[in-house]
Structures are given as structure tokens and as C-alpha cells.
Image (spheres, grey):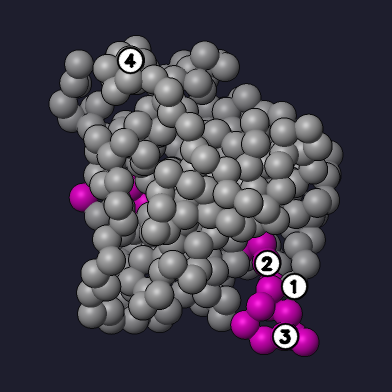
Amino acid sequence: MFQKIQHTESIITITNKIKNALTPMVERLDIAMKNKIKFLLFSILFIGINTFALEPTKDIPEVKVGQKPIYVENSKAKYIVAIVDTGYNPDLATVKLKLCKTGHWNVIDDSKDSLNSKLVHGTRVADILADKLQNVNYCAIIYQVFSENVEKPDTYANMNVNKLTLALNKAKSENITAINLSYSGTGKYDSELKAMTELSDNKVILFTAAGNNDIDLTDTCNIYPACYEIKNKLVIGARDYEKPSLRDKHSNYGKPVDIYAPGYKVNTEKPELEIRTSYATPRALAEYILFLESKNKANVF
């Protein structure tokens, strides 16, 4: 059953809340600031006052698969985004990604080779970020934490939480603005929670997928990392493709979900068939970066 995405406040009221949200981001976010960012992203992604229109485009351009990335010195990037996923492969990419020159890690085999993955999921997540942030001075660090399932090629095997925690701990040494976590599961791990909490304490904003189980997380929240209680974490659900005022039928929902964003891939022939919270999550993250960028450039309001 679809859950109606309610918004009962006027645009003027929400705009005023956005104005209040335009405070320096150098201080650690508290609950009040998190709520202001939620209102901001809600306005961007639902009302469409920024780069997202209310209705997603139905026009699919001609796509060239295989996009050589642009490498950016870490120290010269204004924003550093971490992607914890299945790795990245420019031969499978449909949009040029700005990659940081250093920091990438494949924790599966403890090497720097996270940019030659056979698995496409992480590349599609990166495509969305690259598409939204083409005019922004950012770079992405890739952490590959999922390996290929040898019994089912082109799918990934179960996550090793020790490997995941290693990636999260490595991310703490980078000057990361936000981290994309487009995965979910029922496993709750103290080491994962501790590493994510420490990232939050380092002023990193964590964008986590709500999951695609079509369940209400309000009373029983057991999908992780979405259900961890972490201060600077936003949980992202997916909106329906044809009716953006409704959540997608696969998306988890309920009180823990902060934002519902469009959850389709870029440059795909049938986006309405591939809606996932995995792809909604990088859209919300990208809009957050665009907000910071517009704030820095224009100092609006």
C-alpha cells in the first residue's frame, strides 16, 4: 500500500525555515539543525525550488557507456564525498565522475583497487552524484565493501561487517563532507554503529538508504544502518516515479525516514522499473552539496 507523503505547511513557512537553516555549517549539527536540513531537502526534492522539478524527466538522452573520470587533488576539492558500496568502474559509467586522486580502497582484498569493479551498483550510485554535481568542485572517494557472488555473477555477496567497519574507519582520516550508504540489512553491529557515530562526531553527514522491504519502520525499526540512532544521519526513502506525491511501493517508510527522493537511475531506458532507495540516497546527498554550494556562492536570504 502506498503511503502519502504529507506536507501541510505553506511554501512561505517552509521557505522561512530554509532561511533559518542558512547558518554556518562549521559547527556540529544538533537535532534542531538536522530538522532544518530535512525541511530544506524536502523543499528541494518535493516542491522543486532548486534543481529538481516536481515531475522527473521522461526524456532519455543517447547514452555513451564508458566515461573516463576526472581526477581532482583532494586538497583542492571544496567538498569530498565518500561512497561505500560495490566499488566503481569507469568502463560502466554513464557520467564523468570527479574522483579524488587518493583515498580509494577495496577492503575486500585490502588494496587501492576499488575502481575496477565488475559490479554495477556502486557505479550507478556514482552516476547520480556525477550527474547532479557536474558544476561543483567536489571529488569522490570510493570504498568497495561488497564482493562479487561467485555463485551468482553480477550480484554481490553478503557484506563482511569487519571489512565495512575498516572502510568507515579509513573514511575518518579524510576530510569528508558527506558519505553515501546505499545499502541496508537486518544485521545490527556495534562496530558499524561506533564507526558511524565517530564519523558523525567529525561533522560528516551520513546519508543512508531506508531499504526496499515495503515495511513501516515506526514501531519496529530493524533495518540498518537506517535504524541506528546517530545524530548527523539522514534516512532516505524513494518516491514513486509516476506519482511523486506517493512513496515507491518498495520503499520502507515511517517515522525514521527523513526524506523521500526520486529513486531512479540516470540514463536508463525504463527508470520506472528500477526505483530503489539506493538511488534516492545519492540524490538527497547531491542536493545537500548543491545547497552548500549555493550558500557559499550567493549568500542568499
| Disc on the earlier residue, 1 or 2 | 2
Q: What is the magenta range?
A: 135-156
Mark 4 → mark 1, Cα distance in angstroms? 46 Å
**Which marked residue is nearer to the observer: mark 3 or mark 2?**
3
Q: Position of residue 11 (x, y in %)?
A: 29, 23
Which SS does the magenta portion mostly show? loop
For mark 3, does the 10 Å Cα neighbourhood hold few (<14), some (14 to 19), or many (20 or more) residues?
few
Q: Residue at x 43, y 28 (%)?
A: 7
Please give the label number shown on residue 152. Answer: 3
Q: Residue 82: within the magenta?
A: no
Q: Relative to 300, say whether 130 is above or below.
A: below
**Front position in the image: 166 or 177:** 177
Q: Secondary structure at mark 3?
A: loop
Q: Secondary structure at mark 1?
A: loop
Q: Is residue 85 visible?
A: yes
Residue type at the position of mark 4: Thr
| Disc on the earlier residue, 4 or 3 | 4
